[in-house]
Amino acid sequence: MNKKISIPIILTVALLMFFIPSALAANTVTVTAPNGGELWDGTNSITWTNTTCKPADTDNFTIEYSYDGGPYTAIVSNTTYSGGSYSWDTSARMDGVQYLIRVRKSNASGTVNDVSDAFFTLDNTPGSHYYEEPTPSPEPLIATPSTMVESLKSPLGIILVVAVLALGYLLWKKK
């Protein structure tokens, strides 16, 4: 049984495959930093990801912070900047361990927001942060002529040399 599929059916299916996923796309915003546990001072980048239902939508973003469970205070309001990052100077903010960031997005499809998953810390106290040099990893054990000569000077090295020479002599003698 040979059935022919018509061109209009193929075009209809192709158009539906193109338009249905974009119509079902979610209108979301997700805070990616700070998302909990960070220690911030000075200027840092608040970052988020953004999914828009309709590409023609104009997204307006409001970025806010909350300290110690208090009300949210706007850092920047109703900006159309959707680059997914905002540089925030924290130096004028009070030090604390219970900060949250909320990014709110409004467009023709509605308003959505996301909040940091957990608290982060602001500490702009001069000298409160220190950089600890990482512990250097041990030097790899690499045999060089000088390390081999030094190894051969030990009693174990002498026994090893004698054993290798004896094994070599025995193998040579068998031939």
Image (cartoon, rainbow, N blue to C red):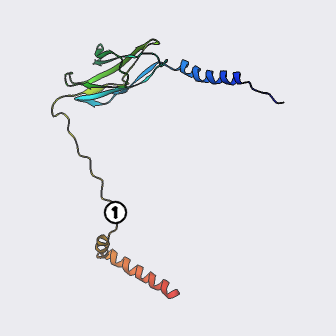
Left or right, residue 138 beside residue 28 = left
Residue 150 position within the rendered picture, expressed as x and y whole percent measured from the top left = 28, 73
Q: Residue at x 71, y 24 (%)?
A: 7
Neighbor class of circle 1 (other Cα within 10 Å; few <14, some 14-19, many 20+) is few
Q: How many marks?
A: 1
* Residue found farthest to the left: 126
* Residue found farthest to the right: 1
As drawn, 156 above or below 116: below
Q: Quadrant of residue 163?
A: bottom left
- Residue for badge 1: 141
Residue 80 position within the rendered picture, expressed as x and y whole percent measured from the top left = 36, 17
Q: Nearer the viewer, residue 104 or 36?
A: 104
Q: Nearer the viewer, residue 122 or 159?
A: 122
Q: Quadrant of residue 38?
A: top left
Q: Residue at x 42, y 15 (%)?
A: 58
Q: Residue at x 45, y 11 (%)?
A: 108
Left or right, residue 125 beside residue 137 = left
Judging from the image, what secondary structure is the residue with disc 1 in? loop
Residue 90 position within the rendered picture, expressed as x and y whole percent measured from the top left = 23, 25
* Residue found farthest to the front: 7
As drawn, 97 above or below 105: below
* Quarter of the image where the N terminus is located: top right
Residue 37 position within the rendered picture, expressed as x and y whole percent measured from the top left = 32, 30
Q: Quadrant of residue 160?
A: bottom left
Q: Residue at x 33, y 75 (%)?
A: 157
The amino acid type of the residue labelled 1 equals Leu
